[in-house]
Amino acid sequence: MLKSKHFELIRTAAVLLISLLLTFIMISFVSGSPLQTIGIFLYEPISSVSHAGNVVEMAIPLMFTGLALSLLFKMNMFNLGAEGIFYFSALVASAAAIHFSLNGFLHPIVAILLGGIVGALISGIPGFLKAKWNANELVTSLMFNSILYGVGQYILNYKLRDASAFQTASFKFEPTAVLDRIIPGTRIHTGLIIVLVCIVAGHYFMYKTKWGYELRMTGANREFAEYSGIKTGRVILYVHLLAGLIAGIGGSVEVLGMYSRFQWNALPGYGMDGALVAMLAKNNPLAVIGSALFLAYIRVGADMMSRYSDVPSELISIIQAVILLLVSADQFLKFWKNRMLLKEAKMNA
């Protein structure tokens, strides 16, 4: 028999099924051959090794930002600073990949760690403002996104730009800094191993350590946590540092794993997407894997659909909006949860 503890899993599955059903309904209205288009959307992302590799490649940065934001959201901190941190840390790692001369083992490690440390320091500023003066972390993090983008564009244009390139891009990375491919026929790189290690470590941190317990207690009720002796200001600060470290590592891994030079002339959007991944995962680090893969799967499917059918890929933005609305709606299926709780109470009486 289904129990109330399984409610969130069932609720998330219902959200995804409803979103896919709405996708099929919209495709049937706009496509001349809806069944073929739906088949492309569902099958093409896994139709070959290279296509499946595209799903995993897209999921890697989503896992990083999803993990970073799940830590913050679990503590009831609606911080969206992973967007700017991801971008700026990638730029820092790119500078290290261009100007440092190290061997093939140390070079990517140094570049990624440097990007992660910069990300942690940047994230620590909104965390300190929140802990010290209770400044709204949403406002400060969004402001930092714009600041980091502006500073990053200045550095790219005036310090790292390759004038011989036919675009606004940095000099090429040293070959020793680029991450290795790990699956033939795809662009899946060693960043997959790094993010999976981070996710397992994040899960252990959140549920198996006293610091993770303090994080969860502070998120559930900050006043009660303070009354219990937890120094919530310190918790807020170290969680922001940890989330910034993860987002910074993610940006560094993405640029060194997928590019030969830094060429982002706009914020890549992975931080905002990470918020959706974290919400789908219900702020559970291990569930971030499935959430990121699902989001990457439907995006690759939408891209394939736009190439091989008469339906534009922008359709996926509607689906993401539906998912976000249903996941964030506290009352969605709540009546069913209340029934389950009532039945369990009667059985235990």
Image: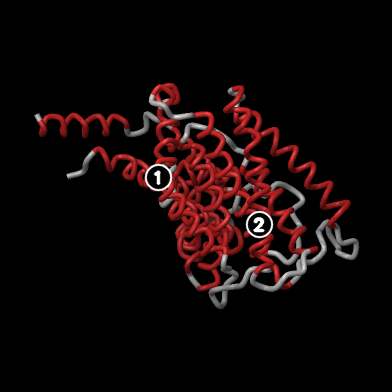
Q: Could you say which is closer to the camera, residue 273 or residue 182?
A: 182
Residue 342 placement (x, y as % from top left): 18, 29
Name the residue: 38% across, 25% down. 228
State the SS at label 2. Answer: helix
The residue under label 1 is: 209
Q: Could you say which is closer to the camera, residue 306 or residue 128?
A: 128
**Residue 291 as seen in the image, left or right of residue 262:** left
Marks 1 and 2 in Cβ contact (< 8 Å) = no
Q: Is 172 above or below relative to 75?
A: below
Residue 235 placement (x, y as % from top left): 50, 34
The residue sitting at the bottom extreme is: 184
**Residue 32 as seen in the image, left or right of residue 114:** left
| Quadrant location of the C terminus in the rendered image | top left
The residue under label 2 is: 252
State the SS at label 1. Answer: loop
Q: Nearer the viewer, mark 1 or mark 2?
A: 1
| Quadrant location of the N terminus in the rendered image | top left
Q: Could you say which is closer to the camera, residue 304 or residue 85?
A: 85
